[in-house]
Image (spheres, helix red, strand yellow):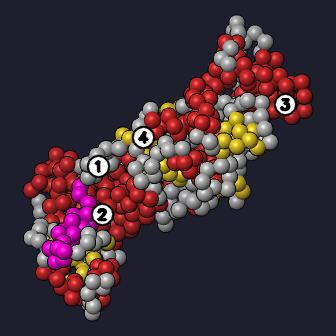
Amino acid sequence: MISISQKIQQIFGTAVHAAYPDSECFSVQVLPSQQSKFGDYYFECARIAQSLKFKEKNINPKDIAKKIVQNLPENSLIEKAEIVSQGFIRVYLKQDFISEQLAHLLVNGVKPPLAEVPLKVIVDFSSPNIGKKMRMSHLRSAIIGESLSRLFEYMGHHVLRLSHIGDYGRQTGMLIAHLQDKFPGYLIKNPRIGDPQELYKESKKRFDNDEEFKKRAVQCALKLQNKEPDFVKAWSLICDASRQEFQKIYDALDIRVKERGESFYQGTMKEVVKEFEEKGFVQLTEGRKTVLPHNCNTDLTIETSDGGYTYDTSDLAALQQRLFEEKADVIIYVVEREQSSHFHSLFNAGQMIGWYDPDVTRVKHVGFGAALIDGKKHIGSGDTYQIKDLLEEARKQSMDKLKAKKRDKVLTTEELKAAQESIAYGCIKYTNFYHDYHKDCTLSFGEMLNNKGNTSTYLLHEFVRMKDMVHSANIDEATLLTAATDTRISLDHEKERKLAKLILRFPEVLQRILEDLMLHKLCDFLYELATTFNEFHDNCTCVEKDKWTDEVKVNMSRILLCEATAAVMAQGFKLLGLNPLQKI
């Protein structure tokens, strides 16, 4: 697929340069029209007029538009360029061009315009803490981070997914000290730790109430930093127990991520502190070594008064390693919005010390709001709502919904389970995307499982309807492929044309998301695609059966349009981590 807006932009860029060869390079932007009666795309001459006013007087935007239209080069895209008031140019696409692009999609698949220069992209997400349950914020981070990773990969970039787990610091000593007391034979035989959260709660209670235990915990953390074997062994047991719990959630939600915790950077933290000291950026604050980056109100503690390192130190070491060893072009941190001040300081520190230039390397914090369940924020401490409970409730509610519609009577056991999991996990994921994720999201199964409105449940049902149209025509894949090559897709009906143009905007939507990282735009596109398909389905007959003779008449052009819609919908699902169904 091609980005039509970019192609038209190139055509208009050529025309602008031909019309005004002696002028500076103007910003050329072509945007999709919101209503078909206003054309398919539009170009605004106001900015060019404003620039020209510095050189010439009495510049009329409409005159500029005329000059640009006169210089449009010959091309296969544009049927008509219509000038309207205030220097707007409406662009109408050629019908043959639209049909050809749809045929290309059907024959070659939904493939995006790949990046000319693939970038190395690191997406930091999930990052739970060893010894603790995964919190709702870690779940939101994992869901958003996985989809951003899929998008960058789909557009041709090289992606490294990293989970910066909390496996370093004083809580490590607390857990080790308690494990040594609870399982004194751990060096001889690996103990069954069970739920690592229980181990954490027990050790935290002792840490808060027992001064001797607290002192010992601090010593255990220091001995782990010094890599003493007995303490490394204890910590590896705790880490393994936590990883097993994390992986259950990742497997259920089809999330792939490489663990690279704070301890990975332990060997370079000392050098990071030294570099900041040598460049004169370190201050002493109540015995701590701190750094206050330019234009920041929050300082970073890079060494504690007793010589220990902090989360700030490990974050700086991680940033340095990703820039210099991984040679990342793009680094994205998917972390709750409450950490925005920290990341502002972190990024400014990296720039201040000369590690990267923001005009060359893109380092971005994707902050997101809280996940609310029953209107309450759950942070994962104590006995609060657990993610495994959320997933189990989602499976239960989706199965109840399927059985209420008697789908268990028509689907096989395998089909019913596939539908249950697709709906259950899909509704949780989609709720994290479908609006601006800087805002809080509410996990309400009554809303999430509604098959009307902008929900994953509605989209999954519409996808099945699209595929059913093809199945009802009794056409196999080979015949469909041949038809895509031999049949010209007719766009005579306004609903056919509206659907076709929307399908072809898919690459443009993805490109905009790469720029601002806002995945709700993909949700909006898929919802618009589904509702536009509904309009098409209501107004354009695809398969007609004669009630007297049972003869089936198939409009192959419209069947191909159904198939193209389903293909784009399926690819959108894949990027969001939703599993499309053939039956529901």
The residue beneath circle 3 is 207
- In the picture of the structure, the residue carrying the numbered disc 1 is 115
Residue at 58 percent of width and 30 percent of height: 271
On screen, residue 572 versus residue 175, left or right, reads left
Query: What residue is rendered at 80% in x and 25% in y?
Result: 217
Q: What stretch is highlighted in magenta?
A: 1-22
The amino acid type, in three-letter code, at marker 3 is Phe
| Measured Cα–Cα span from mark 4 to mark 2 | 30 Å
Spatial CA span between label 3 and label 2? 57 Å
According to the picture, the residue beneath numbered tag 2 turns out to be: 505
**Sequence-first tag of 1 and 3:** 1
Q: Earlier in the sequence, mark 4 or mark 2?
A: 4
Real-space CA distance between mark 3 and mark 4, rounded to the nearest whole angstrom = 40 Å
The answer for how far apart the CA atoms under marks 2 and 1 are is 17 Å
Above or below residue 238? Residue 61 is below
Q: Quadrant of residue 197?
A: top right
Q: How far apart are marks 1 and 3 (CA)?
A: 52 Å
Residue 328's label in the rendered image is 4
Q: In the image, what residue occupies the spot 30% across and 58% down? A: 507
